[in-house]
Image: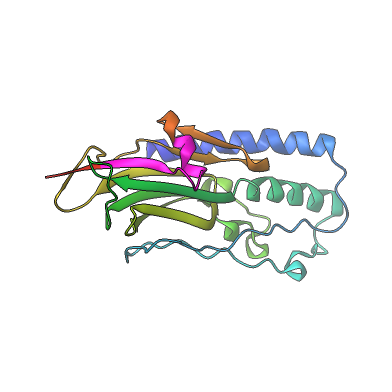
Amino acid sequence: MKRNVLFAFALTALLICLLWLALRKSNLPSGPVVSSPQPIQITNAQIPQTTSLPAAPTNNPDALIRPDSVDEPTWNKWMVYRQVVLEQNQPVEFYARVLDQNEQPVEGARLKLKLTRWDENEFSMSNFPHWDPAKAVREIDFFLLSDSNGWIHLTGTNGSSLAVWGLVKDGYISSYPDGNFGGVSYEPNGRRNPSGDIQMTNAWNPEKGYILHLQKE
């Protein structure tokens, strides 16, 4: 919980800086800014669970018309702020492959992932002007299964980071305990940064993938 609060505080401070720069460098048009988040789509089979990945809402331009009670300068500032926040959700692309000690693919291995993203609903017109970025940061735990060739693919969703939290399969010994041991941060303009393991750079390469090993008992 403490880690989540610190993360939200740091990210909110970053957004304030980005907002200040945006207001200095850009002349915002009178019309509202509308983001276009990508829809959620899981490539591999997802294990049923209570918490599922949300479908990104479809933006309705008419819902973002400036209310008469809000003056245009204030509205423009909020629209810049909204755009900066929603740009933290970037397309997520993650490829991994599970192999045994003989470099053979392992089917049905369960990989636990944690997706961090911004909830666009917090920045809808129904919440205006009471947007609270600290409440909008969501961490979503979910699981994917490796296919017959050992591959795990995650595409079609969006977020700010993806962390790998564990890998298990009955009959195999795993060296990946439950807990963050690496991941990828997704940033605007297509920037991607690995964490935990330099080999994580292969996680956005569909030809290589990030290699995970299990040892058969």
Identify which residue, 40 or 24, lies in the foreground.
40
Residue 137 in view, yes or no: no
The residue sitting at 81% across, 50% down in the picture is 76
In x, y percent, where is residue 86? 64, 51
In x, y percent, where is residue 167? 28, 46
Where does the N terminus fall, quadrant-wise? top left
Identify which residue, 96 or 48, lies in the foreground.
96
Residue 83 in view, yes or no: yes
Where does the C terminus fall, quadrant-wise? top left
**Which residue is situated farthest in the left direction here?**
217
Say whether residue 142 is left or right of residue 57: left
The residue sitting at 48% across, 34% down in the picture is 194
Residue range of the region highlighted in magenta in the rendering:
200-213
Please tell me in which quadrant of the rendered image residue 119 appears: bottom right
The residue sitting at 32% across, 50% down in the picture is 111
In x, y percent, where is residue 181? 35, 35
- Is residue 59 one of those drawn in magenta? no
Identify which residue, 16 or 109, lies in the foreground.
109
